[in-house]
Amino acid sequence: MAKVIVVTSGKGGVGKTTSSAAIGTGLAMSGAKTVIIDFDIGLRNLDLIMGCERRVVYDLINVINGEANLQQALVKDKRISDLFIMPASQTRNKDALTKEGVEKVIHDLKADGFEYIICDSPAGIEQGAMMALYFADEAVVTTNPEVSSVRDSDRITGMLSSKSYRSEQQLTPVKVHLLITRYCPERVEKEEMLSIDDIDDLLGIDLLGVIPESQDVLNASNLGEPVILNQDCDAGKAYQDAVDRLMGIERDLRFVTYEKKGFLSRIFGG
Amino acid sequence: MGLLQYFRQEKPKKGSAKLAKDRLQIIVAHEHSSAAKPAYLPEMQKEIVAVIRKYMEISSNDVKCEFTDKGDEDMSVLEVNVALPKQHTPY
């Protein structure tokens, strides 16, 4: 049974596209045919993060308007065989996304055998964001341990439970997961940053994963390689854990506690 | 202060995370309660005041409209409370 998963947040710049790229890539690595759709019409960026920007010919709006078919618009990933990207249009505006159009694209992707359809939402709560979440079966709410991000995550969680197809049709509600990104255990230890428990208390959403603040994320985007492909770094491992949990495999939380440097390692380095 | 006291002293926690959480708790609770109310409520309240004013002198503060969502039960309650000035009490 195909699953539509929206990666959303309300607030911008918290890591939606980075997380969409990592999660989509991780799911495809498990052998499931996966597509990541960029819903950020006019400000597409998923292609850059995935490193396929030079191979984009047609886009989501072309498909909705019947100017191209699915196969023409899907960009096949060169590293993972079951992974595809559906780019957003860079020239149209967000109103080009119609409910009927998006519904047809998702329907056709399912018919084409896609098991996971990842919808990378734009920031905000306007047309693009609402269309990205409307057909979702599950949602990954990306949140930074910071006041404005937490507030916006709460708001978008409300939208998921009132403005989605599942809510309107009174089906089983969208399954909402919390993904905390840019987490800094050292600052949490110093009580300078909201902790996992604080965010959990405030939002009351099931925790899918915690991605530590990491220089490797910027490196990965510089290279156009989803950070999950770098399994030597903490952020890559943390994303892999999150993907495993999304597929129902239990994984303990990692990289969430601050190890104070001991006396010896302070002297000798470690 | 003695040396022993210095080491025993608990370091004051200066972090701002606690304040962030407190502020968020208040704003999130507030937004939840206002999100449950229909958007037409203030407009409806104005219209109710206008209708009553056709017949008697009241101020807009005399009418209170409360909308409550009974989470567990399968209904919402609209409560309209009109406080009338004494001279209008029928006898």
Image: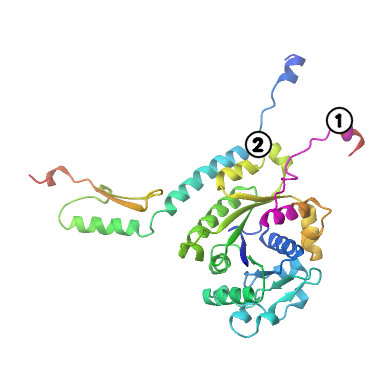
Q: Residues within 10 Å of mark 1 (few under 14, many from 20)?
A: few
Tell me which residue sits at (28%, 48%) in the image. B61
Q: Position of residue A242 (x, y in %)?
A: 70, 54
Give A225 or B84, whichever is nearer the viewer.
A225
Q: Chain of mark 1?
A: A
Which disc, if any, is residue A263? 1
- Which residue ends up furthest to the left in the rendered image? B91
SS of the residue under disc 1: helix
Query: Where does label 2 land, which residue?
Result: B15
Taking the image as shown, residue A209 lies to the left or right of residue A66, namely right
Locate residue A53, reporting x and y percent: 75, 73
Relative depth, front residue between A162 and B65: A162
Q: Position of residue A212 (x, y in %)?
A: 73, 49
Residue A83 visible within the image: yes
Please rate how many residues cluster around mark 2, counting C-alpha atoms within 10 Å: few if below 14, some from 14 to 19, many from 20.
Answer: some
Q: Quadrant of residue A259?
A: top right
Name the image quarter holding the C terminus of chain A: top right
**Mark 1 is on which residue type?**
Phe
Name the residue furthest bottom: A67
Q: Position of residue B75 (x, y in %)?
A: 35, 53
| Amino acid type, callout 2 | Gly
Left or right: A216 with respect to B43? right
* Magenta span: A239-265
Chain label for disc 2: B
Element at label 2: loop
